[in-house]
Image (spheres, rainbow, N blue to C red):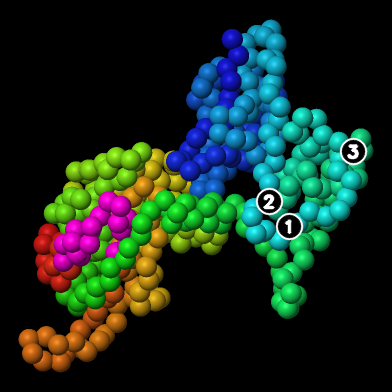
Amino acid sequence: MAVTVVMPKLGQIMVEGIINRWTKAPGDLVAAGEVIAEIETEKLNYDLEATGNGTFHPVANEGSVVAVDGVLAYLLADGEAVPEAPAPPTPVPAAAGSVVAPRAATQPATTGDVVPSTPGARRLATKLDVDLAKVTASGPRGRIVEDDVRKFSEQGAPLPPGLPAPSKSVPVSGKRKAIAEHMRGSISSTAQLSFLLDVDVTEAQRLRREASSDSDKTIGMPHVLIKASAEALRRVPAMNTVLHDGTVLYFDEVNIGLAVSLDDGLIVPVLRNAESKSIAEIAEESQVLAEGARAGKLSPDDLAGGTFTVSVLGSVDGFTPILNAGQSAILGAGRSLDKPVVKDGEVVVREMMTLSLTVDHQVIDGAVAASFMRRLQQAIERPAALFK
């Protein structure tokens, strides 16, 4: 019996993926475990392995956008006929607010929901977020070719009155589109409330620098904040929760997502069991995750299972981060600055940092959030225990 190769679901919010490249040619013999395709999602690139043996027969083209569980290919036994394949995937429509707009034109004939087009046109349409159903075909037999897609994209949409001509127009697509949808979904499904607190990081910075000088790994304030957050979460377990299907799930393990900035967006790999790791171990693992994120080498497991998130922006004084879907809380941290503060009745200069905690008020009450912030402040301002 033929082995059906389908688009895997590689994350909670994944609904489709792109076949970047087939690594096998039609007719090649494939063994279970061999890589047969490179798949791209909004968050990562993934090597798709065969789950069985057989002769490779693709049914989707390179560059195609395929829904999760959609058929990509078959692995056939000797002499086995190709199963009747479902209709090829429909290219993704243009994002809301995209500069692409329909224009008056005669539409090409379609077969079912499939728009006749060349593989190159489909790849370009995916890249530019163009709805092929709105493009006029000029190719043989009424097929859309790359030039049709390019002309449609370049035409753009009418600008709102009064705006100057833009220097360039960039459709919201790929990772940026996924991030936008994720953030809107987070805001619409939660009751987000933020708390701010200035903490004295003078001693933590001193110990951090000493630890870095004694190690071959650079230990930064984000690593200190992760360790301090893990300690505070153990003492305020209501914060280490996930809201799932109307049920609040509590965890003993502290899996902290670390927000990593990319050239084209943001990704949050997860550092597992942070409560049982030293700051040096946290620093080493965080560096590996960050490097993997920027190289596009993270696995789906690296991005799943977070129970809390830490986001650090060292170029601003403070900010209020948006929750990751499902999680009950996220900590934001700005830069640390020397400031005059009153200590023991005297005005002294201390290195201060503004922390902001955003919670889902459906799950976390103000008193619980305040208790967490006090625990966090104590851990950071008396940091010797963190560096043991």
Q: Nearer the viewer, mark 2 or mark 3?
A: 2
Residue 370: percent from the left, percent from the top? 19, 64
Please identify the quarter of the rendering in which residue 336 is found: bottom left
Other-residue count near label 2 (Cα within 10 Å), few / some / many at <14 / 14–19 / ≥20:
many
Mark positioned earlier in the residue sequence (2 or 3): 2
- Using the image, determine if residue 300 lies above or below residue 207: above
**Regarding mark 3 in the picture, which secondary structure is present there?**
helix
Q: Is residue 61 left or right of residue 218?
A: right
**Regarding mark 1 in the picture, which secondary structure is present there?**
loop
Which disc number belongs to residue 94?
2
The residue wearing badge 3 is 142
Whether residue 371 is in magenta: the answer is yes
- Using the image, determine if residue 61 lies above or below residue 296: above
- The answer to whether residue 97 is seen in the rendering is yes
Mark positioned earlier in the residue sequence (3 or 1): 1
Q: Is residue 68 left or right of residue 60?
A: left
Other-residue count near label 3 (Cα within 10 Å), few / some / many at <14 / 14–19 / ≥20:
some
The three-letter code of the residue at mark 2 reads Ala
Closer to us: 287 or 242: 242
Mark positioned earlier in the residue sequence (1 or 2): 2
